[in-house]
Amino acid sequence: MTVMSMKPVPLASVGKHLPDVDAVQPIKDYLKQFAKLSEAKALELIEKIKDLKSIKLKETHFVKIADFLPRDAEDVHKICNDVSLDEQEVNSILNIVKEY
């Protein structure tokens, strides 16, 4: 298999890209345990965060927010540790995440 491109995807989307063989069962078990949202909900959350139009946030941030569902400002800052978000940006993210 050749990697043609790389794109971050939420945990909820990983399972559909795996072959259906016994060797990947531990990965599927991991995903079942740690994916907090369905694929549809995760993608919906990512789109809502993108709609904030923050030039500071990248695709990897959107995906990690959907995977971890931060509950407070400290959690958001841990996910977005390579950018400096102001209080308004953090609160906007948290308000969207609260819906999920």
Image (spheres, rainbow, N blue to C red):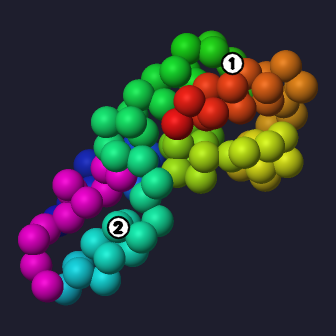
The three-letter amino acid code for the residue at tag 1 is Ser
User: In the rendered view, would you say 24 is above or below 96?
Assistant: below
Residue 15, magenta (yes or no): yes
Taking the spot 23% from the left edge, 79% from the top edge, the residue there is 24
Q: Is residue 48 left or right of residue 86?
A: left
Q: Position of residue 23 (x, y in %)?
A: 19, 86
Q: Which residue is mark 2?
A: 32
Return the mark for residue 44.
none
Helix or strand or loop: what does disc 1 sit on?
loop
Could you tell me how far apart the alpha carbons at marks 2 and 1 are, in whole angstroms?
31 Å
The residue lying furthest to the left in this view is 20
Judge whether residue 59 can be spotted in this image.
no
Q: Nearer the viewer, residue 61 or 45?
A: 45
| Residue range highlighted in magenta | 12-22
- Number of labels in the image equals 2
Left or right, residue 63 beside residue 95: left
Could you tell me which residue is drawn at 73 percent across and 21 percent down? 92
Which circle, 2 or 1, is nearer the viewer? 2
Q: Is residue 18 magenta?
A: yes
Residue 71: x percent and y percent? 72, 45
Q: Of the numbered discs in the image, which one, if any, rests on residue 54?
A: 1
Q: Earlier in the sequence, mark 2 or mark 1?
A: 2
Near mark 1 (Cα within 10 A), the count class, few <14, some 14-19 or many ≥20, is: few
Specify the principal SS of the magenta part: helix
Quarter holding the N terminus?
bottom left
Asked whether the beta carbons under mark 2 and mark 1 sit within 8 Å of each other, the answer is no
Instruction: Return the residue nearer the eye: 39 or 5.
Output: 39
**Drawn side of residue 89 relative to residue 36, left or right:** right
Question: Where does the image place residue 70, in percent across and percent down from the top left?
Answer: 68, 46
Find numbered disc 2 in the image and state the secondary structure of the residue it sits on: helix
Residue 11 coordinates in the image, percent (x, y): 41, 55
Q: Residue type at mark 2?
A: Lys
